[in-house]
Amino acid sequence: MEAVLNYPVIIVHGGAWYIRDRDVEGHTAGCREAALVGWELLKGGAPAVDAVEAAVRVLEDNPAYDAGRGSYLNSAGRVQLDAIVMDGRTLDFGAVAAVERIRNPVSLARLVMERSEHRFVVGAGAEALAESYGVPLCDPDDLLGRINEGSWSPPRYRIVTDPTAEGGLIHAAVDPPDLTVVQGAGDTVGAVALDVSERLAVATSTGGTPDKWPGRVGDSPLVGCGAYADDTAGAAAATGVGEALMRIVTSKTAVDMMAEGLAAQEAADAVIGKLWERVRGYGGVILIDRRGRVGLAHNTPNLAYAYVLPGQSVVAGVARETRISAPGRAEGLAAVRGLDGRGRVTAD
Ligand code: GLY
């Protein structure tokens, strides 16, 4: 097996969708903070699963993102949250969905993985499980950060089916069909880490799509769709339109590509290409392969991200894709620029 080049490593994202110019700084800062919180743990020898949970908690607590405090409202005017944690060493995971009174769903997902006999628990049952573990339930209003910050207005955003397209392709649409009109849109958050013991882990958390049907669950908490980690191959977190991401089992597909020998960036490009070619989906991914190389790609207007590699300072930004409706490399790849010939990422 090839030697690991880099460890520890962490990469986080703040969602693949449209980020207004005035929000770029805040989205970048939030990702940078989350990556550094995870990085400090990794540097101290903590397991990757600790790092991804801690990083995602930071993002859940930040109202800029569609996760935890700041999530979109569903069509009933309520916040319903989904999250997953996966440990690449054991292939174990825990997930929750449609919870309304959990401030940090990622931590409840971890409790499900480590303390329950189940792996995926939803709704009131998940909240009751949280209480049984001593996790205080929050007031649903505590999750309305986006509205309380005064920055939220309902996006004109819908998932639509195109019956004229081959296979009845599902994609995201806005009315009018200009992605840049979506106001205040962020998306799902996620983190992927490789620790000093060469263990991989991933965590994903979301409020789902704006104006979603109550009870609707997207890709995020579904193992293999919103997240997947396997120490023998790599780990991936996905973001974007769940209805499409589920159809190509995005994160597992990306990990399988790394298992077949693609480097993280190659797999990121390939899986976003597949997302478009097969289901006309919009989304993004962040990856770490088992050698410690990072990758990111998206075909949405933006993807906020940050990563830290050993011996280098944190790199954070908002990647831009100007060729909307086209698959492939985002400008953000420039941030992951300069694979140095030995497959290592060079950073600023
Ligand atoms: N990717 C988040 C969702 O569709 O719910």
Image (cartoon, grey):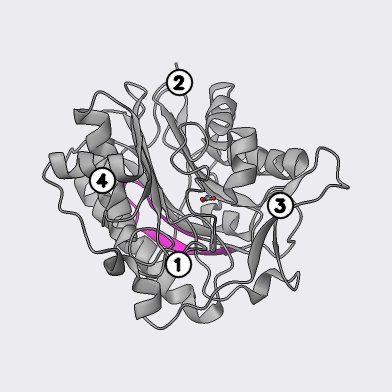
Q: Quadrant of the N terminus?
A: top left
Q: Nearer the viewer's eye, disc 2 or disc 1?
A: 1
Q: Residues within 10 Å of mark 3 (few under 14, many from 20)?
A: many
- Assess whether residue 35 is covered by the magenta stretch: no
- Assess whether residue 315 is covered by the magenta stretch: yes
Residue type, numbered disc 3: His
Toward the viewer: 202 or 136? 136
Q: Which of the two labelled residues, at mark 4 and mark 3, occupies the earlier sequence position?
A: 4
The yes-or-no answer for disc 3 within 8 Å of ligand 1 is no
Q: Which mark is residue 2?
A: 2
What residue is drawn where x is 58% and y is 37%? 250
Q: Which of the two labelled residues, at mark 3 and mark 2, occupies the earlier sequence position?
A: 2
Rounded to the nearest whole Å, what is the CA distance between mark 1 and mark 3?
Answer: 23 Å
Q: Residues within 10 Å of mark 1 (few under 14, many from 20)?
A: few
- Evaluate whether residue 305 shows in this view: yes
Q: Nearer the viewer's eye, disc 3 or disc 2?
A: 3
